[in-house]
Amino acid sequence: MYQLVVKDTDELIGEIDENELQYLIDALEEESLGDQDYAITPMLLEMFRDENVSMNLLDLLFSALGEREEVVIYWRSQALS
């Protein structure tokens, strides 16, 4: 499992699985090989909705965006307990 986090505040958004993470990696622009952060906008989320992205991922991203015009998120591996 992986965690999505708001970059500015380190607020945990929620957990995604490997398939959802791979979708983000494939669909969004990364500035470098080690890049793990993405800018999320309302337009992007509408595009994701049209592509039938998992409801879990959409719900988490909509929640992170809230009323903002953009939010930058990043992902991290969830530490095993």
Image (cartoon, rainbow, N blue to C red):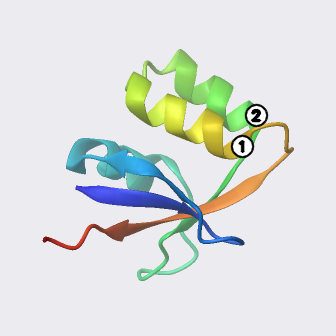
Q: Which mark is residue 25?
A: none
Badge number at residue 65: 1
Identify the element where label 2 is drawn: helix
Pointer 2: residues within 10 angstroms few (<14), some, or many (20+)?
some
**Are the two marked residues, 1 and 2, in contact with CB atoms closer than 8 angstroms?**
yes
The residue at the far left in this view is: 81
Question: Comparing marks 1 and 2, which lies closer to the viewer?
Answer: 1
Q: Is residue 5 left or right of residue 42?
A: left
Depicted 46 relative to depicted 10: above or below = above
Q: Amino acid at mark 2?
A: Pro
Identified at 37% across, 26% down, the residue is 54
Q: Position of residue 42 (x, y in %)?
A: 76, 34
Q: Which mark is residue 42?
A: 2
What is the quadrant of the C terminus in the image? Answer: bottom left
Name, please, the residue furthest toward the front: 81
Image coordinates of residue 40 in percent, x first then y, are 68, 48
CA–CA distance in space, label 1 to label 2? 8 Å
Relative to residue 25, is residue 59 depicted above or below?
above
Residue 2: quadrant of the picture: bottom left
